[in-house]
Image: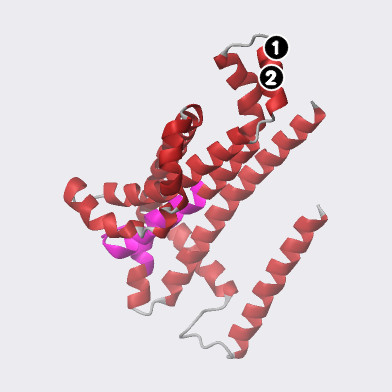
Amino acid sequence: MRIVWIRMGVIAATVLAVEALCQSGIIDPFTMIPPSEMIAELVSMLVSGEHHDDIALTLTNVGIALVLAVTVGFAAGAILFVMPRVRRVVDPLLASYYAIPIFVFYPLFIVLFGLNRYPQIMIGFLLAVVAMIINTLNGFDRVPRVLLKTARVHRLGRMRTISLIILPYATLYIFTGLKLAVAYSFIGVIAAEFILSGDGMGYEINFAYNNFDNQTMYPLILLILIIATVINMGLYTWEKWFRQRQTER
């Protein structure tokens, strides 16, 4: 709990420092507006409903990319875990995956899917799925051998071993993959909207940036930070509850 308060104190101090620098004119308003003005503009924007469609579109795309990445990533990790020969072939590709600039495939996705939301979803999916695969494998690999031997002693079948031993032990590592997948899904979808899109929060931020509209750009960036932080804090709370429950058991 102390760490949480320290973290919140650091964030509050940073925000207050930026506010003071903006209000004093050290940071030019043309460069950045004060955090208090960002919050006021964000509230006004949400009340007016001016960007509701763009916000809904982006969050929907992120949600689809996240669900696909978590589902496919977990399934692929489980398959690679039970197929060690295939895993030995795939491991070098997983290790070097994030060295590949995923956005180079964006023109290909446009050709395949057209100028719509699906290329953006694919970028978010491709960025997030490997993080889920790697953390699923990491969780399965860390199950102690003694637990697997105990399962064999009690003659548990494969499915009962997975459900009663492997999955409960690996859940915390899978949570890590889930949290990374959330971040990568946001990054992929919003960055794709920056590149070539006519709607969405990424498009609106890019349009505001090119037109020096700080009153739109910074509140939208703040909204993305708030949404991502709330989701990750929710996952962190769930993970903490699960860890405590495991300890009690």
Q: Quadrant of residue 159?
A: top right
Magenta span: helix, strand or loop, mainly?
helix
At 71% from the left edge and 41% from the top edge, which residue is drawn? Answer: 240
Q: Quadrant of residue 208?
A: bottom left
Q: Quadrant of residue 4?
A: bottom right
Q: Residues within 10 Å of mark 2 (few under 14, many from 20)?
A: few
Task: Identify the amino acid type marked 1.
Answer: Val
Asked whether residue 155 appears in the rendered view, the answer is: yes
Is residue 96 rendered magenta in the image?
A: no
Task: Identify the amino acid type marked 2.
Answer: Lys
On screen, residue 167 versus residue 85, left or right, reads right
- Along the line of sight, which residue is nearer the eye, 18 or 147? 147
Residue 34 x, y percent position in the rendering: 57, 78
Residue 169 x, y percent position in the rendering: 67, 30
Looking at the image, residue 93 lies above or below residue 27: above
On residue 149, the disc is 2
Secondary structure category for the residue under label 1: helix
- Along the line of sight, which residue is nearer the eye, 141 or 212? 141
Task: Give the residues in magenta.
Answer: 181-205
The residue that disc 1 covers is: 153
At 72% from the left edge and 73% from the top edge, which residue is drawn? Answer: 13
Q: Residues within 10 Å of mark 1 (few under 14, many from 20)?
A: few
On residue 94, the disc is none
Question: Is there CB contact under 8 Å for labels 2 and 1?
Answer: yes
- Along the line of sight, which residue is nearer the eye, 62 or 183? 183
Secondary structure category for the residue under label 2: helix
> Where is the C terminus found, in terms of image quarters?
top right
On screen, residue 199 versus residue 113, left or right, reads right
At 43% from the left edge and 54% from the top edge, which residue is drawn? Answer: 96
Residue 69 x, y percent position in the rendering: 43, 41
Asked whether residue 50 appears in the rendered view, the answer is: no
